[in-house]
Image (tube, rainbow, N blue to C red):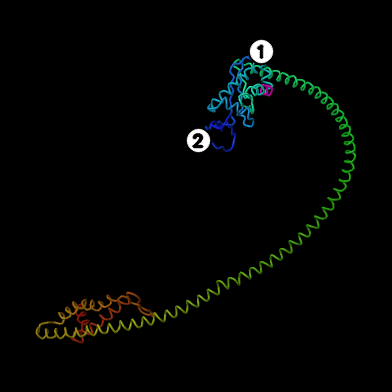
Amino acid sequence: MIVSGCCLSTPLLVPGGRVFVWPIIQQIQKMSLNTMTLNIHSEHVYTQLGVAISVTGIAQVKIESSNEDMLLAACQMFMGKSEGTIQSIAGETLEGHQRAIMGNMTVEEIYKDRKKFSRAVFEVASSDLIHMGICVVSYTLKDIRDEEGYLKSLGMSRTAQVKCNARMGEADARKDAGIREAKAEEQRMAARFLNDAEIAKSQRDFALKKAAYDQEVHTKQATTNLAYELQAAKTKQRIKEEQMQVKVIERAQQVHVQNQEIQRRERELEAMIRKPAEAEKFKQEKLAEANKGRVVMEAEAQAQAIQLRGEAEAFAIEAKAKAEAEQMAKKADAWKDYQDAAMVDMVLETLPKIAAEVAAPLSKANKITMVSSGQGGVGASKLTEEVLTVMERMPLVVEGMTGVSISKAMKGKRRI
C-alpha cells in the first residue's frame, strides 16, 4: 500500500500490515507484490556462427519489498499500472537480454551447457531490472528448436558417431571373443583326445579284468546252477509227494463233506418237503372228511326238503285228481256210453300237464346240492328220476280214484 497526501513529504510504503489514512486529505494506492511467471519467447535469433534458432525461457520475477529504495523505484515506475503491464515490461526486458546472450553464444554451447546460458541471462537481466525495483527470482531455459534441422543434424552426427564406435567396439569384442573361443576349442579338443585315449586304455584294462572275472564267475555259477537244479529236483519230488498226500486227504475230506451234505440235504428235504407234505395230506384228509360230512348233511337236508315238497305236491295232485275223477265219474254217470278207453285217453292227455306241474318247483330253485351215497343216479338224471317216480305213482292214483287200470287198458289196447 502506498499512502500519499497531506502531512507526508514522501509517500508512505506499507509492504504488509495496517495503516491509518485520513479521508479526503490522504490517498491510498495498492500494488501487487506477488511472484509473476513470464514465458520469454525469442523466435529466429541468429547465434554467434549465424545459425538461427528459437529459444523459450521461463522466468519468475517479483517486485522487491525488502529493499525500500527498490520498492520506491517500483512505485515510481509502476504506480497505477496493472499487473499485466508490469509483466509485459519485465518480459520485454528479459527477452532483449535473452536475445543478446543468444547472439554471443554458439548453438552447441547453448544446447550442451544450458546452465551457462541461463546463468548469463539471469545476471544480465537482474542488473537492469533492479533499477525498476524488480528482482529476478529464477530463470530456466525451457526449449531450444530450429527450423533448419541443425539440432537434429547435430544429434544425428553424434548418434552416427556413437553407433560407429559401438559397431567398432562390438567388432573388436567379437574378434577377441573369436580368438579366445578358438584357443579354448583347441585346448578342449586336445584335452578331449587325451581323455579319450585314457578312457580307451581304461576300457581295455577293464575289459581284460572283466573277462577274467566273468570266467571265474561263470564257472562258480555253473557249479551252483547244477547243484541248485539237483536240489530243486529233489525238492520238487518231495513237493509232489506231499501234494499227492494232500490230494488224498482232500479227496477223503471231500467224500466226507459230500456224505455230510447228502445227509443234510435228506434232512432238509424231509423237513421242507416230506413233513409239510404229510401235514398237508393230513390236513386235506381232515378237511375232506369235514367237507364230506357237511355236504352229506346238506344233501340229506336238501333231500328231505325235496321229498317233503314232492309229497306235498303229490298230495295236491292227488287231491286235484280226486276232484277231477269225481267230475269224470259224474260225467260217466251222465254219459252212460263213456267207455274205459276214452277215460284212459283223457288221463294220458292230462299226464304231461301233471309232469309239468311237478317239475315247476324244481325250475325255480337257485341252488341244488346233491350227495351220492354210491347208489342211484347223480346230477340231472337224479332230478329226472325224482320226476318219473312221481309220474309212476299217477296210474295208481288214477286206478284208486276211477277204478280203471291204465296198465290193463294199455295192454288191451295193444291186443287190439
Residue at figure coordinates x 52%, y 76% from the top left? 279
- Whether residue 339 is situated above or below residue 200 in the rendered picture: below
Residue at figure coordinates x 36%, y 81% from the top left? 299
Find out whether residue 119 is within the magenta segment: yes
Instruction: Say which quadrant the C terminus sits in.
Output: bottom left
- Whether residue 399 is situated above or below residue 205 in the rendered picture: below
| Res. 259 image quadrant | bottom right
Element at label 1: loop
Q: Amino acid at mark 1?
A: Leu
Residues at marks 1 and 2, CA–CA distance in whole angstroms? 63 Å
Q: Nearer the viewer, residue 391 or 12?
A: 12
Q: Nearer the viewer, residue 338 or 164?
A: 164
| Res. 302 image quadrant | bottom left
Q: Residues within 10 Å of mark 1 (few under 14, many from 20)?
A: few
Magenta-drawn segment: 115-120
> Which SS type dominates the magenta stretch?
helix
Which residue in the protein does label 1 denote?
A: 49
